[in-house]
Amino acid sequence: MNLHFPALLLSLLPLAAAEFPKAPPLLPPDTRYKADLLLIVAHPDDDVVIGGYLARASLDEHKRIAVIYCTTGDGGGNSVGFEAGRSLGEMRTIEARRALGSLGIENVWFLDGHDTPGQDVLWSLDNWNHGGALDRIVRLVRLTRPEVILTWLPDYVVGENHDDHQGAGVLATEAFDAAGDPTRFPEQVAPPRNRQGMMNMTEGLHPWQPQKIYYFTDAFEDFGPYWHDVQERSPFRKNIAEDAGPTYSQTDISPLRKTSYAKLTAEYQTFYLTQEGYLGTGAIKKNDFQDFEYPTRFIFGKSVVGGSTTGDIFENVRPDDACAFAPVTGYRVSKTDELTFELGEPWAFYRAFWKAHGIEHISSLLPVPEAAIRFGNTLHIPLTIRNGTTAARDVTLTFQLPAGWSNKTRFAVYPVRAGEAYPVQAEIAGPQTGERGWQQLTFQGEVDGRRIGTVELRVYVSNSGALPQ
Ligand SMILES: [Zn+2]
């Protein structure tokens, strides 16, 4: 045995360490920004709709919540002052920070989208620079690493149905499916060359696959305070969110605050004074929170960790678990060699969008598409004729309208060449007056007396300013 060997080895060690210096361990993502739940909405005050749940999750379940607003709310009205436009937006961002701060929520971001009046989601996505907004939301998903995303329902539903709300829901769904994919916005997940140096052009984030996404809507009849004209609240229709996801009672008592979530929602709303804060202050003054006792309902979107449709939002959720990327099928061409006739954008977009993102069950919430109109106004209905055949065809459109309605569409016959999709804007004048309620409109496309498709649309006719036209 060579007794000198261990001594020789020891004498070599310092030399080895000097020759092969060990790098420090990687720095983990900054835990101050980790969220359990990320809320993605359009306007400062959209959060009031689920204010009771936010209070429950933040105060009583100790969930870390982060929030993204796609706009500053610069297009809204001002209930208490003369400030409008961008100035109002500056104020509403502070209202939101104060409201969320009252629940202990501090990680809040505002994108630079502007308010888009209307109901067509494609208008909002265009107005917001869709790609740029998605870039920012994906970045914030990767930064906050939420297990759950909550957002507005991406669907055209009569009620409040703001196109910006729908736009937030579309972007949130896209971000849910993109943030775990390192080939989407790869500059965000490429490491910086030198994190302590300046002008790093890549961002050092990690891909992140959220586990669940849920939607909510304010287009339902028992959503008390938001129906300005109480007369319009009934009859409407079954709440589309009923049994479509978890429900949380507003009359439950918050163990921390020792008061009902309804009252906490009213208090929460008072921060949004430029908006409908008066509903909150009024309820507090009267000590009557009935208008805030509507249950908070969510619509199950999808989950990559299983769980039931109506189970708790955090059912099956694995805390702090970096889930494997769960790719969706994406858009698939469904070619037909037929002539077809269907409702155009934005409904056509949604049909393809739900399928592409694995949330096709959203289509069953409203089996017959719907729209709303005030008495005396005109409805613009987008229709699409597709010719999948190899020959040009003349397609005749016929409309079946209820009494009091009239067709103002300029043309009735459309020449559609092989392979073309012809967009038609039907113009239908609604009745001048009558009973408010739902009416059914039917549109048919025919070629040589043969029907190629039927489009049905339910239209809610009323005098209400609360309902869009
Ligand atoms: Zn809104």
Image: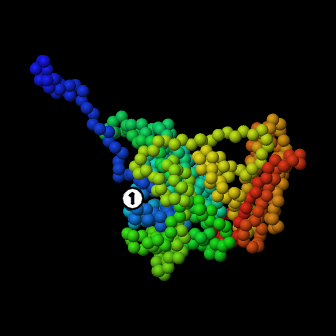
- Residue for point 47% across, 80% down: 287
Give how far across and how far down residue 171 sits, in percent.
54, 50
- Residue for point 76% across, 54% down: 455
SS at mark 1 in the image:
loop
Give how far across and how far down residue 348 sits, in percent.
68, 49
Give how far across and how far down residue 38 sits, in percent.
46, 54
- Residue for point 51% across, 43% down: 326
| Rendering quarter of residue 76 | bottom right
Whether residue 201 is situated above or below residue 33 in the rendered picture: above
Furthest toward the front, the residue is 1
Give how far across and how far down residue 268 sits, in percent.
45, 69
Depth check, front residue: 187 or 361: 361
Q: Is residue 236 visible?
A: yes
Q: Is the image coloured rainbow, by chain, by secondary structure, or in one colour?
A: rainbow
Depth check, front residue: 398 or 427: 398
The residue that mark 1 highlights is 106
Q: Amino acid at mark 1?
A: Glu
| Rendering quarter of residue 216 | bottom right
Furthest toward the right, the residue is 449
Specify few, some or many for label 1: CA neighbours under 10 Å numbering under 14, 14-19, or 20 or more.
Answer: some
How many badges with numbers are in the image? Answer: 1
- Residue for point 49% across, 70% down: 250
Furthest toward the left, the residue is 3
Q: Would you say the beta carbon of the disc 1 residue lies within 8 angstroms of ligand 1? A: no
Furthest toward the bottom, the residue is 286
Say left or right for 164 vs 103: right
Q: Is residue 270 visible?
A: no
Whether residue 175 is situated above or below residue 283 in the rendered picture: above
Which quadrant, please, contains the N terminus?
top left
Which quadrant, please, contains the C terminus?
bottom right
Depth check, front residue: 142 or 254: 254
